[in-house]
Amino acid sequence: MKSTDTIAAIATALGESGIGIIRISGEDAISIADKIYSGKQSLMELGSHTINYGHIFFEDEIIDEVLVMLMKSPRTFTGEDTVEINCHGGILILEKILHAVLESGARMALPGEFTKRAFLNGKMDLSQAEAVIDIIEAKNDLALKAGIRQLNGALTESIKTIRAQILEQIAFIEAALDDPEHYSMDGYSNKLRKIVKKIIGRIEYLKKSFKDGSIIKEGINTVIIGKPNAGKSSILNLLSRTDRAIVTDIAGTTRDTLTENIKLSGISLNITDTAGIRQTDDVVESIGVKKAIEASNSADLNLVVIDGLKPIDKEDIELLETVKDKNAIILINKSDKELKVGIEDIKKYSNKDIIIFSAKENIGVDELEDMIKAKFISKEINFNDQVIITNIRHQEIINETLESMEMCISSIDEGYEEDFFTIDLLNAYEALGEIIGETVDDDVVNEIFSKFCMGK
Ligand code: GDP
């Protein structure tokens, strides 16, 4: 399945910037680049891992002054000969150089094809390749940390250890069945039961880590609800520190919903600001209200904003009722002025956590961050040194593995013949192999790499 043709793509974002990079990888990468390069020496004569100053020209015209990075197989990202042309970061220059490279014999790379080659050439396994996307897409520190750990092989190691333990048992059962004179099965099922139980514990931990993993990767879907003028837009602005949401004094100006990704310390909130929830005859406004309730229903977290300068009324109580069975935090806003609403007033109607808040004076934000973290990130998960599952593909495989291991326990408990155990053990072994890409269909591999960006 090894590819021999040479691929090329623009590896940096298409926009004006200081530098731009065109990446070429494959057997002919160096000779292709050499056709359009003019420097002190031909690229063909230069050593690996060198940076070389020169010019790129095509059809007798100089396109740009460049630095060419030359890296010979196998010590490269893809494992193949690789050339990276560092040019000035203009869209036209990048496109012209890419055109010259393609005209000289390379083919346009597909999205993710460089990383796919790295995988096919054994430079990284599938979970590490997936970590490359996670790192590029990371929206906060914890997501980045989890991605880097996965790229460094933390998940790979964990999966390989479990697979080795399973394989050892499969091998023993096979050997004992083939050669009963030398291998005794006496008491084996008890021993196997203990081993499988231990492995189940480890897999259950991985399964549990996905809850936190998906939260840090995807963010917490959050809605801010409250009566018009309670301060929802102001709170959104405070948290995002931008002025994207419209803040006005007229009741009901936040007509539609808008979502913003907001980075708190370590985790992200995908915040939807909604129209104030209230009974209304205004058509535009009522569409907003309906959306607000819908958004609230599907949110992971509701931030309920109470206007602290007005005694709570029927509408506030209705709102508190709406979030009764949901994950919610109540913010009594405008505490920079004398409040007419106290914690006790809210407690009559709600048993949710309450924070005295002020969007204007930045009061209560730290408490809010701490409260959100405590609600969503379990204390057992340590992001510094534990493996965390952040990928839904991995999570599905983990569930499948768990099922097979549990079936193995049932087979043991029901006193089945030993060769039955092998079936379940083998299923678990193969399933886990899919995470690292040892036992995986081409379709799955193609699907994974198609999600990459161009030039990666
Ligand atoms: P929304 O309709 O719920 O989105 O409310 P806005 O964010 O538009 O705020 C309505 C009014 O309340 C504006 O005049 C804000 O300046 C004011 N406001 C918002 N938060 C605070 C606060 O913490 N303290 C004070 N004093 N006024 C606030």
Image (tube, grey):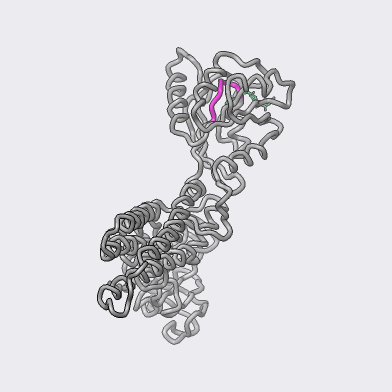
Quadrant in the rendering for residue 432 = bottom left
Q: Nearer the viewer, residue 151 or 235?
A: 151
Q: Classify 285 as above or below 406.
A: above
State left or right for residue 416 relative to residue 293: left
Q: Quadrant of the C terminus?
A: bottom left
The answer to whether residue 445 is visible is no
Q: Which residues are magenta?
A: 224-230
Residue 227: in magenta span? yes
| Picture quadrant of ligand 1 | top right
Coordinates of residue 362 in the picture (x, y in percent): 69, 35
Q: Classify 96 as above or below 302.
A: below
- In the image, farthest residue toward the front: 186
The number of numbered discs placed on residues in the rendered structure image is 0
Q: Nearer the viewer, residue 172 or 202?
A: 172
Q: State the residue at coordinates (50%, 34%).
A: 272
The answer to whether residue 209 is visible is yes
Q: Classify 71 as above or below 368.
A: below
Quadrant in the rendering for residue 121 = bottom left
Q: State the residue at coordinates (39%, 57%).
A: 452
Coordinates of residue 136 in the picture (x, y in percent): 48, 57
Q: Nearer the viewer, residue 382 or 266?
A: 382
Quadrant in the rendering for residue 172 = bottom left
Coordinates of residue 46 in the picture (x, y in percent): 47, 85
Residue 121: in magenta span? no
